[in-house]
Image: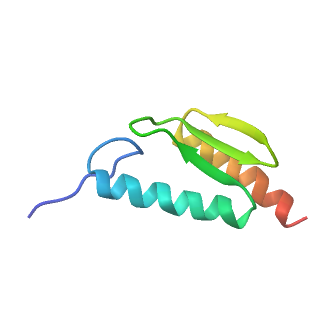
Amino acid sequence: MHKLPVTPFGTAPTAMAEKAFATLQAQYALCGQTLSRLPGSKAMYAARWGMVRHLATEEEARLFLARIEGRRHE
């Protein structure tokens, strides 16, 4: 039986990483933010109203999302 490994953004299998990134982008969009990254890079950028935040890892992106989601519910 062939098992697909669970991997972070930017590593194989690409389809899984792209799906995970697209899901994270959608979560950011629900908070009024955009989430972008350069092709081949693990670093991401969250932006809103011309303010940009560099997020070096998936973990940083998830932590920042938790912060902005908390603001949305206040």
- Residue 49 sits above or below residue 51 on the image: below
Q: Which quadrant: the N terminus?
A: bottom left
**Left or right: where does residue 44 sit relative to residue 46?**
left
Image x and y of residue 37, in percent: 52, 42
Q: Which quadrant: the C terminus?
A: bottom right
Between 6 and 24, the one nearer to me in the picture = 24
Image x and y of residue 2, in percent: 11, 60
Between 2 and 46, the one nearer to me in the picture = 46
Image label count: 0
Which residue appears farthest toward the right when viewing the image?
74
Query: Which of the colour schemes (rainbow, by chain, secondary structure, one colour) is used?
Result: rainbow
Image x and y of residue 21, in percent: 48, 54
**Left or right: where does residue 63 sit relative to residue 43?**
right
Between 40 and 63, the one nearer to me in the picture = 40
Which residue appears farthest toward the left when viewing the image?
1
Residue sitting at x 81%, y 59%: 70
Task: Name the image quarter holding residue 30.
Answer: bottom right
Image x and y of residue 14, in percent: 30, 51
Residue sitting at x 75%, y 61%: 32
Residue sitting at x 71%, y 37%: 53
**Left or right: where does residue 37 sit relative to residue 33?**
left
